[in-house]
Amino acid sequence: MKRILIMLGSLRAAASSAALARALVERLPAGVQAEFADIGSLPHYDADDDGGAPVAALLDQLRAADGVLFVTPEYNYSIPGVLKNAIDWASRPAYQSVFKGKSCFVISVSGGALGGVRAQAHLKYILNGMLAEVFPHQEVIVPEAPKKVTDGRFTDEGILAFAEGALYRWLTAGPVAP
């Protein structure tokens, strides 16, 4: 059994990123188990503090995961602060963090026409700086994401099929292979 940890960039229950992630979990191949990280419970990053139980729980989840799937919106041309905060907690010690060598896949969503491409680029840049193994292709971006959610469910079958195919390539390409 392979385990992936899902890190959402939005805390909002009705977020299109959350709806997309839930839909993709339903499509994961046999032998792959998914778990969601609770980044909303983390304190603000402070290098003088260890962050207590919420940070310890996140680090345990990251250590146990064979790979990390990020599904994030774009806020102000970048990643949301809550996601950056979680990454900052997990990024220590520098170049030796739980992200070193960790297989990662990034999906971005946006209410706009660009689908969060700037957030995706920024997140990949951050992950590369921590020596994570960021899957290089195919990029999954979801433009006008709120229009693709009905009653809390992500309903765009074309996007779901494309994302499922890209996830399958990630899952079978290396350390996350079931």
Image (spheres, rainbow, N blue to C red):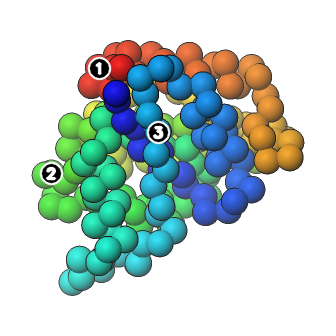
- 67 relative position to 138: left or right: left
Q: Which sits in the foreground, 38 or 169? A: 38
Task: Verify CB contact (< 8 Å) between mark 2 and mark 1.
Answer: no
Residue 57 falls in image quadrant: bottom left
| Residue kind at label 1, given as amino acid type | Gly
Residue lying at the far bottom in this picture: please name it: 48
Q: Which residue, given by chain and number where applicable, does mark 1 sit on? A: 174
Q: Front-most of 176 and 115? A: 176
Q: Look at mark 2 in the image and give the residue it sits on.
A: 95
The amino acid type of the residue labelled 3 equals Ala
> Could you say where residue 86 lies in the image, as x and y percent from the top left?
40, 63
Q: Earlier in the sequence, mark 3 or mark 1?
A: 3
Q: CA distance from mark 2 to mark 3?
A: 26 Å
Q: Secondary structure at mark 1?
A: loop
Asked if residue 90 lies left or right of residue 32, the reply is left
Q: Vertical placement of 49 versus 108: above or below? A: below
Please tell me how crowded label 3 is: few (under 14), some (14-19), or many (20+) other residues with Cα within 10 Å: some
